[in-house]
Amino acid sequence: MKKKILYVDDEEINLRLFKNTFRHDYEILTAVSAAQGFEILKTTPVDLVITDQRMPDITGVEFLGLVQEKFPGIPPGRLIISVYSDPEDIDLAFRNYQLFRFISKPWDQKELYEIIKKAINNE
């Protein structure tokens, strides 16, 4: 059975690109908002949460904080994929919200594949 990844990003093109790239290896669930991501998490167990950092209503770090609070059973590896990074926010996510890695956009397919594999396996 394929591992499930939830990717939250307010830009649908990023969601489509990610899904098209990794759908053969993983079951990809996508959400264009944190609210939509939370709705998915209420009903579907996932193996990895990936989020953009800069979104209209909430940052990726804030999203991961709420995931940590509301869904403590989700495995620990979490990723932020973003052009934007505030070092203090990212450090907070590493310290408190089980951030596994921050990845800058645009991402490299082979590198991201390896990072995802390590995050899911908690390596």
Image (cartoon, helix red, strand yellow):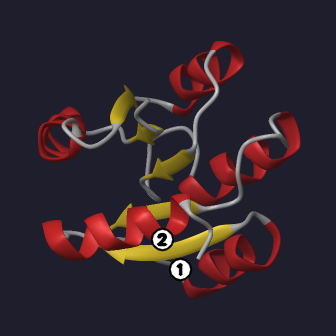
Quarter that holds the C terminus: bottom right
29 sits to left or right of 59 = left
Q: Nearer the viewer, residue 44 or 90?
A: 44
Determine whether 50 is above or below 93 in the image. above
Q: Which residue is mark 1?
A: 86
- Mark 1 crowdedness (10 Å alpha carbons): few <14, some 14-19, many ≥20: few
72 sits to left or right of 48 = right
Query: What residue is drawn where x is 64% and y is 75%?
Result: 89
Q: Secondary structure at mark 2?
A: helix
Q: Which numbered disc flags the more N-terminal residue, 1 or 2?
A: 1
74 sits to left or right of 123 = right
Residue 118: give its label.
2
Q: Nearer the viewer, residue 15 or 114?
A: 114
Q: CA distance from mark 1 to mark 2?
A: 24 Å
Query: What residue is drawn where x is 55% and y is 54%?
Result: 60
Quarter that holds the N terminus: top left
Pinpoint residue 25: horizontal percent, then vertical percent: 26, 43
Give, as a three-letter code, the residue at label 2: Lys
